């Protein structure tokens, strides 16, 4: 598991701990909007965050801050960068 995958999974699962039923519904809708292979990569920590697809995900997160996945990707990047320093 790469450090970015670890950071993403940690932030997503920390968020899930505070979810209500509407949040879970939003998560399912968000996951439905991504390609199946990307969802599998998220779940099994095999996503390569060092690709153009990851840049698109980060941009999408900035454009759509009300999604579940997007803000967690941004939190992951922030967490990873803060640990690097």
Image (cartoon, grey):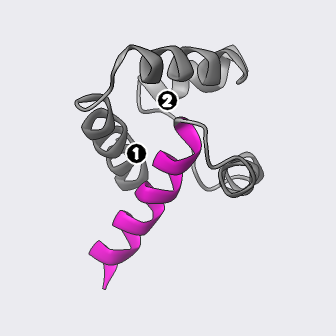
Q: Which callout, 2 or 1, points at the residue further toward the start of the chain?
A: 1
Dot 1, how many residues are within 10 Å of its Cα: few (below 14), some (14-19), or many (20+)?
many
Look at mark 1 in the image and give the residue it sits on.
Answer: 8
Identity of the residue drawn at 33% across and 76% down: 82
Q: Is residue 16 above or below residue 67?
A: above
Identity of the residue drawn at 68% across and 58% down: 62
Q: Quadrant of residue 31?
A: top right
| Disc assigned to residue 65 | none
Nearest the camera: 44 or 70?
70
Nearest the camera: 35 or 69?
69
Is the Cβ of the residue at disc 2 closer than 8 Å to that at disc 1? yes
Q: Which residues are magenta?
A: 69-85
Would you say residue 54 sits in the magenta stretch?
no
**Main SS class of the magenta portion in the image:** helix
Look at mark 2 in the image and give the residue it sits on.
Answer: 42
Identity of the residue drawn at 22% across and 30% down: 17
């Amino acid at each position: 598991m790469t450090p970015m995958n670890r950071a993403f999974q940690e932030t997503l699962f920390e968020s899930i701990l505070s979810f209500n039923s509407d949040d879970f519904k939003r998560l399912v809708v968000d996951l439905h909007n991504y390609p199946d292979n990307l969802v599998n990569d998220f779940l099994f920590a095999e996503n390569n965050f060092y690709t153009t697809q990851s840049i698109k995900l980060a941009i999408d997160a900035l454009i759509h801050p009300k999604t579940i996945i997007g803000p967690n990707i941004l939190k992951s990047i922030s967490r990873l960068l803060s640990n690097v320093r």
